[in-house]
Amino acid sequence: MMNSELSKFKFYISDKVKFAEVDSFGVVHNVQYLYWIEWSRTEYFRNLFSEMNPKEFISEYPVMVVHAEIDYFGSALFGDSYKVFSRISLVKNSSLKFENLVISDTGVLLVKASSILVHLNNKTYQPERISDELRAKLKKFEGEDVEFINE
């Protein structure tokens, strides 16, 4: 199941566990995984919109996390290498569903997470329909592995 699930992920970042991310036993703090996932989402968008500078992207496509779920399956230790896989699996009217897997370089699933992000109007900060441009980029990048539901 893991390999078939992992095959849907077309984007990942990798890093090593830093000293500031662990407790006195050398184990990664639970909250750190959320920071890694946030970094991966940011890099996912940077990759998707590589032609835009970050300020331009933020002003054109402001998004806010409105829901997050995370399940922990293992622990990473100081100095361990890991990858954070990210994908958008669902696009609705104004929301996106991200899915993430954090996997150690030894192949151990550490975390499985999902989050819902809402696209906001850049003046009113109210939910706004995701643009056709963003939808097209997501379809091109994710292919058949993204579901579109227009509400």
Image: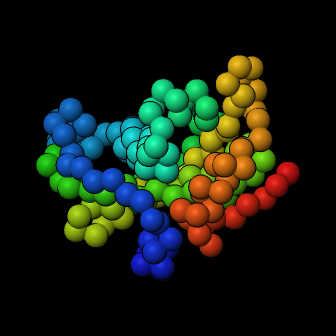
For this view, does 30 lie left or right of residue 64? left
Q: Could you tell me residue 68's position as x and y percent?
A: 57, 43
Q: From the viewer's perspective, is residue 7 above or below residue 146?
A: below
- Which residue occupies 44% across, 45% down? 50
For this view, does 20 lie left or right of residue 98? left
For this view, does 131 lie left or right of residue 80? right
Q: From the viewer's perspective, is residue 108 above or below residue 126?
A: below
Which residue is nearer to you in this view: 80 or 43?
43
Residue lying at the far right of the rendered structure: 151
Q: From the viewer's perspective, is residue 18 above or below residue 123?
A: below
- Which residue occupies 33% across, 53% down? 13
Can residue 84 be seen from the camera position used here?
yes
- Which residue occupies 62% across, 72% down? 144
- Which residue occupies 52% across, 29% down? 56
Count of picture labels: 0
Q: Could you tell me residue 5's position as x and y percent?
A: 49, 73
Image quadrant where residue 131 sits: top right
Which residue is nearer to you in this view: 78 or 53?
53
